[in-house]
Image: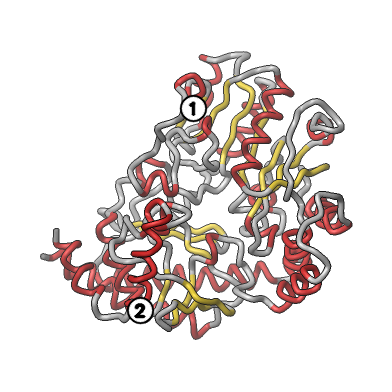
Amino acid sequence: MLYDTCIMAKSSSRSIAHSQSAFAKAQQVMPGGVSSPVRAFKAVGGTPIFIREGEGSKVTDIDGNVYIDYVASYGPLIAGHCNESVVAALSKAIGKGTSFGAPTEQETLLAALICDAIASVDMIRFVNSGTEATMSALRLARAATGREKIVKCIGCYHGHVDSMLVSAGSGALTLGAPSSPGVPASVGSTTLLVQYNDLDGAKALFAQNAGQIACFCVEPVPGNMGVVLPAAGYLQGLRELCDQHKTILLFDEVMSGFRVAFGGAQERFGVRPDLTCLGKVIGGGLPIGAYGGRKDLMEMVSPSGSVYQAGTLSGNPLATSAGLAMIEMLREHGLYDVLETKSGYLEDGLSKAARKAGVPLTINRCGSMITPFFVKEDGQPVTNFEQATASDTGAYAVFFNAMLEKGVYLPPSQFESWFVGLAHSQDDLDATLKAAAIAFKQVATVRAG
């Protein structure tokens, strides 16, 4: 109740009249007024801001408020809004046509760049979203093994595929609906669950279902219950376990691919999966997804093989042109060191500000993905779904709204990653930490009652 009162009191001090009007209209024609659940601000209270434009590290809403943006379209905008190279590539491409339903050279060039960057990917197929990528990769894994069951980690989110929408993270977790109505029991029964970072639990699950598991699908760095890091040896242990049971190891790198390292989390942690799902960064901010892996597996996909998957807009020239510009830019030596430095500076500053305000905090970071968890005791570990969901979401809501008041736009959920980008300047980072110091004090005050 204290949290609710604080949020309501603060929400009136910033002019958002146009966003309020726009949201009222949107709710008449779209469920909840949004096209994706977390955008509705239900977890943090108040009215969602409607964005008019973005440039560099900042977005401007339709009321004219300017914010330092750490949402970054949930990951793709690693180089910021309206990056010159990406805009130039899009401007050139759109003048030639938006979609042809036919092959283009841009597809091949982007595919070659990705295969060169990610060691485990020999061949790749483009789709339109991360959800499509996961759905298609699971179908391929089942076909390759002749098995039906798949394993996923509790709290990891792999898109709204029926078989994956079981104990999911992200929007499903934020809105308190980790499993969705409409998913047939027969489909859900083929999905086996285990806690992330629980290698012993995974081994027991494989022993109980020997010879039945087609695929272990995992975010190598979960970002949809907040950022959670793999324990030492965990990903390597999964690789060995899958090898032992002749099971496909699928890394969902839709979020971490080209974000935590040029070669993704699999490069950062030195583990080679059989299949990889990608999205976000590889489209430069446009809708895209992809799945790829070993040549023998990918050649099972139609028309080379019999595993069917198709898409009218897959590999369209706009998304692939933007993706080419983005990935070519990221090849530049030293850019990931720059991201590491910026993100480390933010992490250290947030930790110091929270400690000074007396607010217990655990910060998980992998490269430029970062989540501060509002925990009960300072430094309390957050290594799985159970520990993540023990966070004080009310405290995060107060923090979120206080930051928004100070011109910093964060994900409207405790269970999402923040994304630091190349466009964030030192002034942006310092302004963020100055705002955070005030926001943490507000959390401490509300908690004190």
Q: Position of residue 111 (x, y in %)?
A: 81, 52
Report the residue that reaches farthest toward the left: 449
Q: Is residue 385 left or right of residue 83?
A: left
Q: Is residue 313 above or below residue 405?
A: above
- Tag 2, which secondary structure? helix
Q: In what element is the residue under mark 1?
A: helix
- Closer to us: 130 or 94: 94
Q: Is residue 17 left or right of residue 258?
A: left
- Give the quadrant of residue 99: bottom right
Left or right of 113 in this view: 196: left
Q: On residue 200, which mark appears?
A: 1
107 and 417: which one is in front?
Answer: 107
Mark 1, other Cα within 10 Å: few <14 / some 14–19 / many ≥20? few
Q: Please name the residue shown 62% across and 26% down the image.
A: 241
Residue 182: x %, y % from top left = 44, 31
- Going by the numbered disc 2, the residue's amino acid type is Ala
Is residue 219 in view from this perspective? Answer: yes
* Residue nearest the viewer, comparing 230 with 156: 156
Q: Quadrant of the C terminus?
A: bottom left
Residue 313: % across, % down: 73, 50
Query: Of discs 1 and 2, which sits in the foreground?
Result: 2
Q: Which mark is residue 435?
A: 2
The vertical placement of 177 against 286, above or below, is above
